[in-house]
Amino acid sequence: MKYLNLIGLLAGILTSSSFATEVSTPTPDHSLWLQQQPGFFRFSYDSIKMPYNISSMGLTGINYFADFTPNIYGGVGAYGAMTGSQGGFFTLGVGAGLHHTFPHHLVADLGMFVGGGGGRSSYVGGGLMLRPHVGIAYDFQWAQLGLHYSYIDFPTGKIHSQQVGVNLDIPFDFYYVRPQDVGHALFHFDDIHLFNGKFLQVQRNDFGLLLQAYRQNKGTRNVNGVIQDGTIGLVGAELDHYLTKNIFWSFKAGGAFRGVPNGYMDVLAGAGYHWPLGSYGFALVPQLQVGAGGGGNVNTGGGVILLPQLGIEWPMTKHFSGRLSSGYLWAPQGQLKAATLTAEVFYHLDMGTGSSTPADFVSNYSVQNWRIQLLNQTYLAPQRTFTATTPSINLIAVQVDQLFTPYFFFSYQAASAYNGLHAGGYATGMIGPGIQTSTLLGHRVQPFAELLVGAGGGGGLALSGGSLIEPVVGLRYLFTPSVGVQASVGQVKALQNNLNTSVINLGLTINFGSLQSF
């Protein structure tokens, strides 16, 4: 229970401060103020000492932190193995900290990460990971580069390591609309206002859902030295963020739902180019991605994987496009080598942000509503492959809901275990539609239902290839238009094995809007 309290404390900091930087300014009718939330991405690297004289694990972290005040930050993040022998090691969680800038561009930092995950459950126990750190960095204005001392502890497992690592912080402010400020469906350029002398500009982002096939080379051997060379089927998502009209960086995550023992997943980031072909909207899209992957007994060595690919994209509607890509995936330190085929449907998120210089004029805008949820999930009696007992397990989950209408939304969820019998390493990725009613009882209470499907694996749970389905019903309670809590119940079922257990979800919700051109 003490670890649940730690998670609750960090989550409370994360949500109670989320809108602390909003500026409450009276606005005329049909005016909209675009709010600015300062923040930064943090990339880190640690070399983790492993038990039993196993080679050290190179652990890479990616976090996004919001600066709630000039000195207090908090957010969500993930860590994955890139070197060593623990390919497939991933964790997901929340973090918070304090930082302060001193003269001569020096920045001191103190923080804590609490999450769940792992790879081989015998090393991580229930999966709970604690990572306190202290560090110092040099501020270049456009980035901060520093050193830190961290202690990574799996209290119920075998990994307890202290080390000195490196980190890179890159500023990335987030612009949003408060729910209480949205009174009209459409806005003109002249209706929108920004603070601090900023100018409105449109930033292109493409968000896609994907299906992938990895056709492994014949004779590929798994981590046990056994031939495991079938085609791996994955489901996942990708975000493309455009830096210029044609150049973008991408972030992709996927998990296996067929073709291997459950548990394989990968997370990749990289760069791409959108090369238009004529006047019909078609484009060639070359990409190069690098990241971490493993699990499902797939031999990726330390975990690092590379994926060059070439795709063709075509318009479907004004807001949607399709992309078909082919490439070649390989793990330099392991056995995995595979030809890849990826089919994606993208939703264009041309979002309004702030700029220090005037940008191209776009006349009309609408508001896209979103909801972020930080959840504790409890599987009440999950079936396992290695024992007939079914003790409960707990997971930390992050879910993003995209509201297309006041009553219909689509959910994207990632979850990772932090407590339970050998549960470490169990993780899921789920997507699906949801419906909700209007708010009731003074605009405080809102019933909802979801139907999630996706992939999961690890922790010895009985779900074979990894495909899952989970219907959910619940209630949300709003303290303010921006912040609330939710409670829901569901039933998670493996489509190919015996896992079939009730799930209880409790968590915090944050509502906001993004400005979108059309």
Image (cartoon, rainbow, N blue to C red):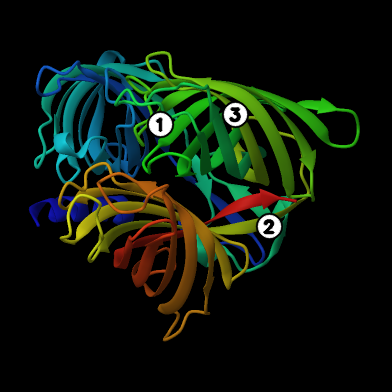
Q: What residue type is labelled 2?
A: Ser
**Residue 409 sits in quarter:** bottom right
Q: Which residue lies at the image location 11% right of the left edge and 17% below the top edge? A: 53
**Residue 215 sits in quarter:** top right
**Residue 206 sits in quarter:** top right
Residue nearest the viewer, comparing 319 with 368: 319
Which of disc 2 and disc 1 is earlier in sequence?
Answer: 1
C-alpha gap between disc 3 and disc 2: 37 Å
Q: Which amino acid does label 3 sit on?
A: Thr
- Classify 10 Å Cα crowding around label 2: few (below 14), some (14-19), many (20 and above): some
Seen in the picture, residue 441 relative to 247 is either above or below; the reply is: below
- Residue under circle 3? 340
Place of residue 50 in the rendered image (x, y in percent of width and height, measured from the top left): 15, 22
Q: What residue type is labelled 1?
A: Phe
Mark 1 element type: strand
Disc assigned to residue 26: none
> Which residue reaches farthest right?
279
- Residue under circle 1? 41
Disc assigned to residue 366: 2
Mark 3 element type: strand
Which of disc 2 and disc 3 is earlier in sequence?
Answer: 3
* 19 left or right of 115 in image: right
- Front: mark 1 or 2: 1
